[in-house]
Image (cartoon, helix red, strand yellow):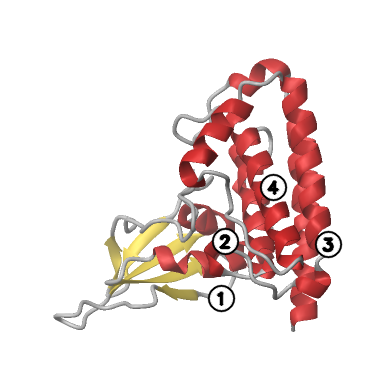
Amino acid sequence: MIEHLIREVSAGLAVAGEDLKATVKGLDEDSFGEPTALPGWTRAHVVAHAEGISRAMQRQVEHAAQGSLIELYDGGFEGRVQAIESRAQRPVAEQIQALVAAVDAAVGAFEHARDHWEAKISYRDGTVSDGALALWRELVIHTSDLDAGTTSRDWSDRFCHYLIDFLAARVPEDTALTLHPLGQEPIIVRATDTGDTATGTTHTVVVTGTLQDIAAWLAGREPVGGLEATDAADAADTVSLPDLGPWPAAVAPQ
């Protein structure tokens, strides 16, 4: 099982890294200052963050291999914010070069960490495999955040199924979701502790759309094609998509 996970995630990381690098290299200098859908972030900020999380995960792996722990970012969340702002102000050519080097180093670190896949890291009090999955999420999602030709519709089915499972923690405690990806089997998603403690009831919402649009919504991104939400008790009753809880992360995401 662990060997299969290593191969699958390592392959996903390698592809995601190449996609991000190719996308960033395709941006012209002026477009780095253009805004993205992420509040307050330009493309330069997205690139700066992708570089930063790559370097952060690289050092998580390297310390784990030595049997030691280190915080994800120097200075915690505030250190992360300051570093992103600083890196985003650099000349574009320098940003691209740094991003490529950081992604290559991080992907390579995980590739060479096969003997330490279950070693502890400080990120989410997890293991090297958790760090690899986290970097996979970051590289794939932020490539589409750049809005430079790649969208969430390009996410693989395997990645979307993994992301939906990971983001189940965002489902409100009194809500359950029945996801109906078009052309695929339904997926039941509910938070770990669902149900109103007083009434013991859980409200079920049926969400229909493409697998990629469903995953994008759960990830806090705008679905490309939109979604339909209905009450499970009355399929004719269209309802609003439920408000999701915070992203399950050790450091607040953008």
Using the image as rendered, state which of residue 9 and residue 55 is in the foreground.
55
In this rendering, the answer to whether 132 lies above or below 99 is below
**Residue drawn where x is 30% and y is 71% of the image:** 173
- Mark found first going from the N terminus, 2 or 1: 2
In the visual, does 240 lie left or right of 197?
right
Q: Position of residue 167 (x, y in %)?
A: 49, 64
- Mark found first going from the N terminus, 3 or 4: 4
In this rendering, the answer to whether 152 lies above or below 79 is below
Specify whether residue 121 is in view: yes
Q: CA distance from mark 2 to mark 4?
A: 13 Å
In the visual, does 51 lie left or right of 215?
right
**Residue drawn where x is 75% and y is 80% of the image:** 2
Amino acid carrying mark 1 in the image: Glu
Q: CA distance from mark 3 to mark 4?
A: 14 Å
Per the rendering, the mark at residue 185 is: 1
Q: For the residues carrying marks 2 and 4, which lies nearer the camera in this image?
A: 2
Specify whether residue 147 is in view: no
Per the rendering, the mark at residue 54 is: 4
Q: Secondary structure at mark 1?
A: loop
Using the image as rendered, state which of residue 93 and residue 36 is in the foreground.
93
Amino acid carrying mark 3 in the image: Glu
Task: Kindly check if marks 2 and 4 are in contact, taking CB atoms under 8 A apart as contact.
Answer: no
Q: Which residue is mark 2?
A: 123
| Mark 2 Cα shell of 10 Å, populated few (<14), some (14-19), many (≥20) | many
Residue 44: image quadrant is top right
Task: Kindly check if marks 4 and 1 are in contact, taking CB atoms under 8 A apart as contact.
Answer: no
Amino acid carrying mark 2 in the image: Tyr
Q: Which residue is mark 3?
A: 111
